[in-house]
Amino acid sequence: MKITGFEWDAANVHHVERHGVSPLEAEEVFLEGPLFRSTRLGRFIAYGRTLGGRYLTVIFALKQGIARVITARPMTASERRYYSKRR
């Protein structure tokens, strides 16, 4: 999956910040070789680590290489197990 950039607006910035994640951290997940899954709604899930070592789940839509982050939050325990087993 090739991501060439990110699209943010005030609403999705506010949403990820409510989860204690900055937009920059959400983007960092894509630098460290995340694990991707697709959903039935045409969205994608990225599981990965930030440069600071936080484990995050990032849900996003992809259009012409641009990722629009819908939400980002710390991984749950079950997501961390899933990520660890498949890495």
Image (spheres, rainbow, N blue to C red):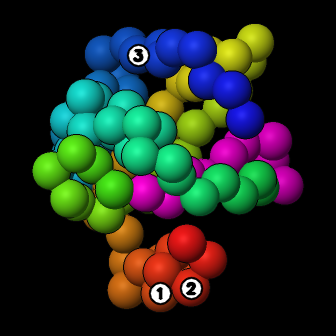
Q: Position of residue 78 (x, y in %)?
A: 47, 87
Q: Is residue 31 left or right of residue 63?
A: left
Q: Position of residue 29 (x, y in %)?
A: 39, 44
Nearer mark to the viewer, of 2 and 1: 2
Q: Nearer the viewer, residue 40 or 55?
A: 55
Please report contact status of discs 2 and 1: CB closer than 8 Å, yes or no: yes
Question: In this orientation, does residue 61 appear?
Answer: yes
SS at mark 2?
A: helix
**Residue linked to disc 3:** 8
User: Which residue is located at x 58 percent, y 14 percent?
Assistant: 4
Density class for disc 1 (Cα within 10 Å; few <14, some 14-19, many ≥20) is: few
Segment tinted magenta in the rendering: 40-48
Q: Position of residue 13 (x, y in %)?
A: 29, 26
The amino acid marked with disc number 2 is Lys
Density class for disc 3 (Cα within 10 Å; few <14, some 14-19, many ≥20) is: few
Nearer-N-terminus badge (1/3): 3
**Residue linked to disc 1:** 81
Q: Nearer the viewer, residue 44 or 33?
A: 33
Answer with the quarter of the image where residue 73 lies. Answer: bottom left
**Residue linked to disc 2:** 85
Quadrant (top left, top right, bottom left, bottom right) of the C terminus: bottom right
The amino acid marked with disc number 1 is Arg
Answer with the quarter of the image where residue 16 lies. Answer: top left
Label 2, label 1: how far apart the Cα atoms are: 6 Å
